[in-house]
Image (cartoon, grey):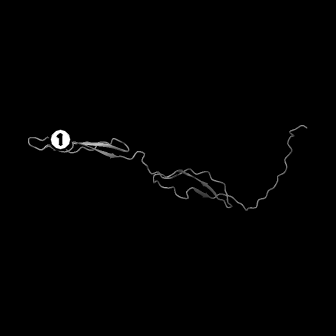
Amino acid sequence: RDCVLGPWEDWGRCSASCGYGQHSRERRVQQSARGLGQGCSGALSQIAKCASEPCGACQPVDCQWGEWEVWGYCNKCGGERKRYRRIGVQPSCGGRNCKPGAAEEISNCTRRCYDEAFCSWEDWTSWGECTASC
């Protein structure tokens, strides 16, 4: 009777969580050779490299806008004000860029430039007490 090898077990865990490691698997002799039978040929264990994520792998990071600044003053007749924000997180590793033009926001506000305005003085108030005696 010839030798018979059993099936391979599943591959074991990789020896590294990042970078390159190795893992192994085994099989057993299911039936030994007897009499004039052929002996087993073939490995009982295998070792192979396992490729995990490279250590320090570059993960895509999308651009993110920062918080809006406070609104600026009304700066045009008819009323217009602006506020700005800056990029809070720069894109990296192939991440998406921030949407162009999203750094400035314009809004209406109340301001009248050409309305006639008249200044007038009020009546004088009473004299206060003198702060010096001479």
In the rendered structure, the answer to whether residue 126 lies left or right of residue 44 reads: right
In this view, which residue lies farthest toward the right?
134
* Closest to the observer, 67 or 48: 48
Classify mark 1: residues with Cα within 10 Å, few (<14), some (14-19) or many (20+). Answer: few
Looking at the picture, how far across and down is residue 47, in whole percent? 27, 43
Looking at the picture, how far across and down is residue 107, in whole percent? 61, 58
| Residue 10, above or below 78 | above
- Name the residue rendered at 58%, 56% in the picture: 104
* Closest to the observer, 24 or 41: 41
- Name the residue rendered at 31%, 45% in the picture: 49
- Name the residue rendered at 12%, 41% in the picture: 33
* Closest to the observer, 96 or 56: 56
Q: Which residue is mark 1?
A: 29
Looking at the picture, how far across and down is residue 58, in whole percent? 43, 49
Looking at the picture, how far across and down is residue 41, in whole percent? 17, 44
- Name the residue rendered at 61%, 54% in the picture: 83
> Looking at numbered disc 1 in the image, what kind of residue is underneath it?
Val
In this view, which residue lies farthest toward the top?
133
Which quarter of the picture shows residue 10?
Answer: top left
| Residue 13, above or below 87 | above
Give the number of marks.
Answer: 1
Name the image quarter holding the C terminus: top right
In the rendered structure, the answer to whether residue 98 lies left or right of residue 122 reads: left
Which quarter of the picture shows residue 1?
Answer: top left
Which quarter of the picture shows residue 35?
Answer: top left
| Residue 120, above or below 29 | below
* Closest to the observer, 42 or 53: 42
Mark 1: which secondary structure? strand
